Image (spheres, coloured by chain):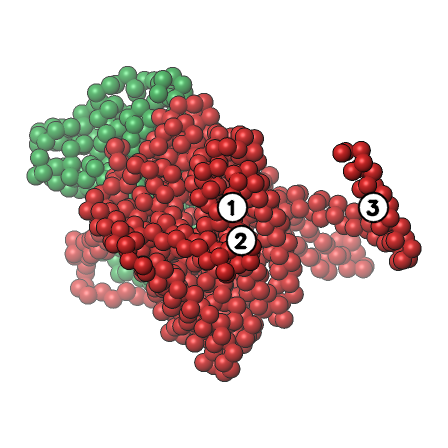
Amino acid sequence: MSGVGVAAVAAQVLVVVLGTPLLTGLMRQVRARMEGRAGAGVAQPWRDMRKLLRKTPVTPTGTGPAFRVAPALLVATTAVAAALVPLASTATPVSGEADLILVVALLALGSVALALAGLDTGTAFGGMGASREMTVAALVEPTILLAVFALSIPAGTTNLPRIVEGALHEPARLASPAGLLATAALAVAVLAETGRIPVDNPSTHLELTMVHEAMVLEYAGPDLALVELGAQMRLTVLLGLLASLFAPWGIATGASAAAVALGLVLFAAKVAMLGAVLAAAEVFWAKVRLFRVPELLAGSFLLALLAVTSSYFLGGV
Amino acid sequence: MPAAARGDRRGAAHRDRPVNTVATALAVAAGSAASGSAASLISGRVRAAVVGVCTGVSGVAGCCAGVAALGGARWSAELPWLLPLAGVHLHVDALSGLFMAVAGAVVAAVSLYGVGYSGHGRGGAASRGVQGVLPLFALTLVLVPAAASVSTFLVLWEAMALASLLLVLAEHRERPSVRTAGVWYAVMTHLGLVLLLTGLAWFAAGAGGEDFASLREGAGDLSPAARGGVFLLVTAAFASKAGAVPLHAWLPRAHPEAPSHISALMSAAMVNLGVYGIVRVGFDLLGGGARWWWLVLIAVGGLSAVYGILQAAVSSDLKRLLAYSTSENMGLVLIGVGAAGLFAAAGQRGPAALALGAALLHVVNHSAFKALLFCAAGSVLRATGVRDMDRLGGLRARMPVTAGLFALASLGAVALPPGNGFVSEWLLLQSLIHGLAVPGLSTAIVLPLAVALIALSAGVAAAVFVKALGVSFFARPRSPQAAEARESPASMLAGMGLLAAGCGVLALVPGLLGGALDRAVATAGLTGAGPLTGGGLRVELDGLAARLSPLWVTAALAAAVVLAAALPRLAVRRRSRHVRRRDVRLWDCGGGSPTPRMAYTATSFAEPLQRVFDDVLAPEQDVDVTPVRESAYLVERVRFQHAVPDRVEHRLYRPVLAALAVTGRGARRLAGGSVHLYLGYGFAVLVLLLAVLAVGW
């Protein structure tokens, strides 16, 4: 059990780290095709990453340890989250520790590190990005935790592998009103957490609108490569989390290597499909104003609250 | 559980002997506090050091007494000669031990810090009066949980309030705002005392005895209405001490204006005693109560958590921000206590014990990180003389150790994984989530809302501490004072180092506290539940699939950071090996190098949040444009004012104060100054009383 379990964790992290640029490439390609452009190809983020990593590392004047450590910390928190979330297998050595609240908090730690790095530069852009990022993060938190709450009611635990196994054994839970409402709430929260349209536009560099990009404006070379990798990994892990929670089919529950391999392939396929759908939807959406974002998040909060109450009243707990 | 058994055996052994650890330690604490107070008569630079050492010893002794009590030792004493009429009753059990240990540990570290802080000889913190009162304040912090009768409790409580009031006023010569803060604190703490006195006197009259043992026995004889009334009165007093909204108004005034080591003591040890009072009276003495008591408590806690952290978010005064964050954390604790009461009222001991354990653990964690935060803020204040974050900045390069310690404490305060705050908030969330199994419509409605409020306050807390750390310590200095800051002396750093070590231990091996927490929870009347198991490296909940191993998470994070920093360098071959990091200019949009004035300040950082919560915070803005005399279109001067007043204070306290002033002015007309008039009043009242007596009897 242990050997396959360890291998499953390692494989999850490796697939997320190595596959995440491909997901970004796929999403950009989908978007380009739908907008009538040829696109740069699915492997372009890989080539960008290699180019950035080869450059000389630079330190902007006046920045300190917070600025230097933040990119590695962002990648590290996401990698630990990728190890904990049952993306391909629920029978791993870490499955006892894989708490949903812990995963959410780890991802938040990455945002906090990046916001501090933005403030460390002492530029207007860095502070602006950090301020906006933390505002959005503060408002996303209640939605995410309420969705966690709603999901943990039928399973009776916040332990992720248990929730996923419960859903595998009892697929009717997923189609219940609580499950659907929680899906919708969590999906909006994921959009906000990963800085996608309509909350933030990952490809903008206009000071009026940028959030994440303003925060990391001073990064260059290998540091920028890590920041980009970290941000993309967050998207992969959160999409993977959504897929594990609401479409858990194919996730290995035993110690068989073949099941884990199948789980990995299905994980890649599910995330690729979610990414493609998100990219396609983004073509038709506009980014909302920063001060309209709270309305969007309040809506998703309401959905999460409805999910909790309906799961209480309909679930007959 | 072998640890518990060992502790109990030790306790039993101590009971047999005439002198036990708790008694000895408390005697040492009292003795060294008294000698510290006497040592304030020494003049010169040694005074602060001697007083600091004596206070520290008293803190260590208090902590030892608390730890012994947590280990299972019990001690009670009656000293009838010490206090006229009632005598002094003392009793130490695990619940008092927990609060005693926390207060003692905070006192020990903070008094070491205080040696350096007040040792520089300037200002009121080094004065003889302050140095004389400080050991006594520290002693009352340790002794209040040991009180075992109403009169002893009230005397110690009032001694603590008076000592802290004198200490708050330490710098009244330097800043007039200290006096205002002192008046607010004095009035509110004494209103609290009146409520407490009324509530406990009512309780004692109903129970037929004033020591805690007879209160415990007689609580059942009280009518439900009387029990509810006692609970409400006592809870209002204790919640005000804990800084719960809407009775918090003194806290954001008094804590920032006190010298920083006093702020640390008040915020990390004194406010805890408010929670202690609620737990002691609500659970232990009254033995639990109706649902509505606890719903009220949860509502107060939720309001404090969210309102406190929102006020902290818009505050640009570093110490005021920390004070409001205390309100927030006490709010979280009250939610936990309220949930515990709610579950206990439904007969569910397991979830109740878990919620109370989480609340008590959060008290411990909050004390560790808040004491450190206040001490670090005090170092900044000492080095720069500035509390306004908009004028700080760039301290990371000038005070690296202080900056590092502030960052560590902030990590605890934002409740994110490697920090100590995360463990207790995780437990609190677990207890609320699993509490949904408790039957009842009120739990189904209240618990999700409580989870949402905790999550919102945690999210805003992240923004608050990113602001506090990033704006005060990072970027470049925004004022000459900040540019000339120097690192604090060794004794201050050592004191903060102790607190940091405490934070680290609580963050990495919280399981060590498991047995002690279980015992404290059992003392509160939830016996036999024992929610936390698997002491040592992990926190595991009994009977629930929930497990947290902070040490492993931290190790995994550290390993991943090292890998993430190292692997890209190895994986990619650069054109030239061993490329040094190169210093480059900041991106300046081609407009010349950015100045500190362009950097985001605390006010600008908080602006989006303030806009989002506009309706709650009701900020006041005023733009005053003066045109030149010749033309209305040419502007000579623009004055912009912006303030976010405490809205609760504005709406709730102002009308009351205004009404009191009107009444006072009206009453002045009665006092005409003529002796005949006053004799007439006396006669009229006498006649009235006689008439009442004649009619009534």
**As drawn, A272 above or below B197:** above
Tell me the number on the disc at residue B86.
2
Q: CA separation, marks 3 and 1?
A: 34 Å
The answer to whether B459 appears left or right of A263 in the picture is: right
Q: Which chain is green?
A: A
Tell me the number on the disc at residue B557.
none
**In percent of the image, x 17 and y 42: which residue is there?**
A14
Q: Nearer the viewer, residue B366 or A6?
A: B366
Quarter in which the C terminus of chain B is drawn: top right
User: Disc 2, disc 3: CB below 8 Å?
Assistant: no
**As drawn, A138 above or below B187:** above
User: Disc 2, disc 1: CB below 8 Å?
Assistant: yes
Circle 1: element type = loop
Q: CA separation, marks 2 and 1?
A: 9 Å
Asked which quadrant contains residue B252, the reply is: bottom right
**In percent of the image, x 63 and y 47: which residue is there?**
B649
Are the residues under marks 3 and 1 on the same chain? yes
Circle 3 packing at 10 Å, graded few (<14), some (14-19), many (20+), is: few
Q: Which residue is mark 3?
A: B686
Q: Which residue is mark 1?
A: B210
Quarter in which the N terminus of chain B is drawn: top left
Are the residues under marks 2 and 3 on the same chain? yes
Q: Nearer the viewer, residue B73 or B392?
A: B73
